Amino acid sequence: MERRQGTSHTIAQQMRQKEAAEKDKNRAKIDPWARPMVTERDIEKSKTPIVYITLAKGLEEVGVVKIELFSDVAPKAAENFRALCTGEEKGRLTYIGTDVGRVKQTYIEMGMIAEGEVSLYGKGFEKEPCGYMHTEEGVVSMVQTVPGKHASGFAVTTAKAPELDGQYMVIGRVVTGMETVKKISAMSLREGYLAEPVHISSAGQLSERVRKPRHVRDAEAEMRRKAAEEDKETVVKDPELDAILSRKYVGKKRGIAVVGEAVEDDDPKAREEELKAKKIVA
């Protein structure tokens, strides 16, 4: 009898463990905070991009918000957000200078480039099946421009925001700086917007060790190849200079490369005048 009771207890315990594991698994599908947390110390080693935005009111800095982007579940949206933070798209598309938009009880909106209709991919991009929901404060999601489409605008929750589920696409979470977000949400409002404008004064990427998307790496490789070809074309060889200099060097000045022999230079100004006379340096 005791043996049967012990067996029943073991089976019941196993069932409870199985139910708990299933519950955790289901929670992980919808709750961004069920993911392993990135700490301040681990930012440089993060496998997902970590970006930052600095918020300011006029010339006064309000604070810095650091955000982890879920590039593993929403790669296209995460790359859009990352590139708008770095401004690497020829400096035209950037979050810098954009204002904080609507301020609601459970979230604030910002990052509206051209009224939120422009993205890295043009006028917008399709929603990705991320699955995460706005379960608590600190969730970062892309604002929906038209049903099923997103662009540059994003929201940060200040509390649980179920009203955004199914409309805004969750793409990340706040790592540090939640106090800055709450400070802004507590500022005085005028018709749902801040009475005194707050804008993004600077933005960028912190986790540079993250592998960039293939199309970005291909574009950078092509740029490096073209730059190398241009440098090769501008190299000027001067036989007379070889007689003056005693060891090989390749130097650049004002876009013109000079190949020859270099020596310890006692009078740099005199040598520059000599180069100018030979029309090597403009």
Image: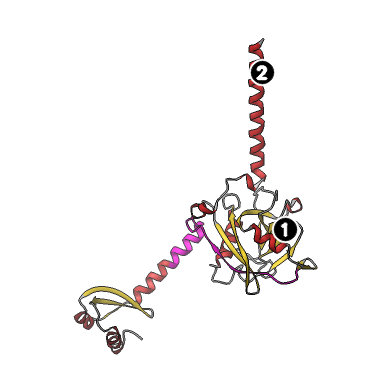
* Quadrant including the C terminus: bottom left
Task: State which quarter of the image contains the N terminus.
Answer: top right
What is the x, y in percent for residue 134?
A: 70, 51
Q: State the residue in front, 229 or 180.
A: 180
In the displayed structure image, the side of residue 48 where residue 274 appears, left or right:
left
Magenta segment includes 201: yes
Q: Please give the range of residues in magenta.
A: 194-223
Give the answer, above or below, for where 167 lies relative to 24. below
Badge 2 element: helix
Q: Nearer the viewer, residue 184 or 77?
A: 184
Residue at left offset 54%, top offset 71%: 90
Q: Give percent across and percent down for residue 133.
A: 69, 49
**Marks 2 and 1 in Cβ contact (< 8 Å):** no
Amino acid type at circle 2 is Ser
- As drawn, 65 above or below 36: below
Tell me the distance, in whole angstroms, between the alpha carbons under discs 2 and 1. Answer: 49 Å
Q: Which residue sits at x=29%, y=88%?
A: 273
Q: Is residue 270 magenta?
A: no
Percent of width and height locating residue 40 = 54, 54
Q: Determine which quarter of the picture holds residue 81.
A: bottom right
Amino acid type, callout 1: Tyr
- Give the labeled residue for mark 1: 107
What residue is pinned by disc 2?
Answer: 8
Q: How many numbered discs sit on the rendered protein?
A: 2
